Image (tube, grey):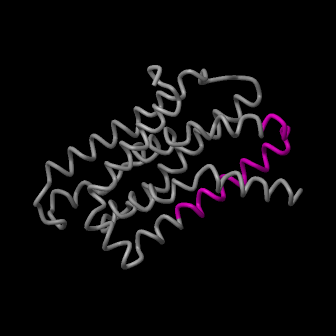
Amino acid sequence: MDLGIIGQAVGLFAVTNIDDILILALFFAQGAGHRGSTRRIVLGQYLGFAAILAVAVAAALGATFLPEPVVPYLGFLPFALGLKAAWQAWKHRGEDGDDEERAQAGGPAPMAVAAVTFANGGDNIGVYVPVFATAGVGGMSVYSVVFLILVAVWCFAGRFFATRRVIANALARWGHILLPVVLIAIGLLILIEGGAFGL
């Protein structure tokens, strides 16, 4: 096994997914106190990243699932989820954080986490495809394994930050506002940077 490829894979993953730590911390803060929320968030993160990886590998092998002009429109996923989160925050404004109805919600659903992960990683596909194409099948396999291991590290880091007292208190107090703002901003950024609607 080539340590150079492993090092490159670690660097590539870190550079292209640094923003996911903040999003994961917000998701973990939103799910705090809900039984099974950690499992659902990790599952969603893996589903979303596996979809990114599958599209990148398929594109590198020559089967393009997503035409390049479609990628910017993935920004609608986090944008819509941000609007939904904003609506939920507004609807529950002034309620106690321990409210039973909210406790039954159980935190973020795996498919919501997966959708945000996939949409936020849409631009990663464009970076991964040429790297995978030049790495060959063996190199692509190493990249994929390293990336999947690092998803777990990223989930741990997101949960770690969400459970630090200062950060957890800030996220508990402002997370219901910060999550929609971050998701809407990510959605708009993907749409604008990708040139959706000629922006």
Residue shown at 86%/57% (left/top)? Answer: 4
| Residue drawn at point x = 51 percent, y = 59 percent | 21
Q: Nearer the viewer, residue 191 or 30?
A: 191
Residue displayed at 86% across by 60% down: 3
Q: Quadrant of residue 127?
A: top right
Q: Is residue 36 left or right of residue 177?
A: right
Is 124 included in the stretch rendered in magenta? Answer: no
Question: What is the residue that sits farthest to the left in this orientation?
Answer: 94
Question: Which residue in the rendered view is the most extreme toward the right?
Answer: 2
- The image position of residue 86, as x and y in percent, is 24, 46
In this rendering, the answer to whether 60 lies above or below 70 is below
104 displayed left or right of 135: left
Residue positioned 28% across, 67% down in the render: 172
| The quadrant where residue 187 appears | top left
Total marks placed:
0
Percent of width and height locating residue 198? 47, 20
Q: Is residue 83 left or right of residue 36?
A: left
Residue that lies at the very extreme toward the front in this rendered image:
199
Which quadrant of the rendered structure holds the N terminus? Answer: bottom right
Observer-nearest residue: 28 or 169? 169
Q: Magenta part mainly helix, strand or loop?
A: helix
Q: Is residue 142 magenta?
A: yes
Q: Position of residue 157 (x, y in %)?
A: 53, 67
Q: Position of residue 62 (x, y in %)?
A: 75, 24
Which range is magenta? Answer: 132-155
Q: Is residue 38 left or right of residue 151?
A: left
In the picture, the quarter occupied by the C terminus is top left
